[in-house]
Amino acid sequence: MTSRREHGTVTPDEQLQRWAVGDPVCPNTAGECCPDFSCCRPKLLWPEEKRRSFVQADQRTREAMLVGALGALSADAGLRAHVIGNHEPNRPPPTSRTPPPRRGRRP
């Protein structure tokens, strides 16, 4: 995988259908890899049943499965990563990772 990708000729839907039957191709017209990144790392190809489950899953389930795929990709690349999911639907996303300022007197 590279940081800059050309856009491919298959649509995301066509890519998903091909991947589901074991033919992972990338990038799609949106510049995306397959859900399990098997287009770039063939040994990460999910079993057929799991691919079928992904195709039929709702968005929340897909997102959870994608978090697992990112973890597997980083492990396969020899990297350590902490992958977090989407924020709560009725809660704004965090704006910063810095802790809130301390209250009280300054030293």
Image (cartoon, helix red, strand yellow):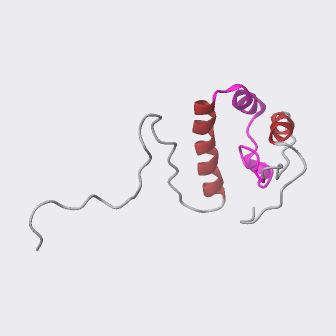
Between 94 and 17, the one lying in front of the other is 94
Q: Position of residue 3 (x, y in %)?
A: 71, 66
Q: Position of residue 90 (x, y in %)?
A: 43, 34
Residue, x 58% and y 62% (percent of image)? 79
Q: Is 52 within the magenta?
A: yes
Q: Is 68 within the magenta?
A: no
Dividing the picture into quadrants, the one containing residue 66 is top right
Task: Tally the numbered discs.
Answer: 0
Q: Is residue 91 left or right of residue 104?
A: right
Dividing the picture into quadrants, the one containing residue 103 is bottom left
Looking at the image, residue 24 lies above or below residue 54: below
Looking at the image, residue 82 lies above or below residue 69: below
User: Which span is picked out in magenta?
Assistant: 31-58
Residue, x 53% and y 57% (percent of image)? 81
Between 99 and 61, the one lying in front of the other is 99
Q: Residue furthest bottom?
A: 107
Q: Is residue 72 left or right of residue 87?
A: right
Residue, x 47% and y 42% (percent of image)? 87
Q: Residue furthest right?
A: 9
Q: Is residue 50 left or right of residue 96?
A: right
Q: Is residue 9 left or right of residue 106?
A: right
Q: Position of residue 10 (x, y in %)?
A: 88, 45
Dividing the picture into quadrants, the one containing residue 50 is top right
Q: Position of residue 12 (x, y in %)?
A: 80, 41
Quadrant of the rendering where the C terminus is positioned? bottom left
Quadrant of the rendering where the N terminus is positioned? bottom right
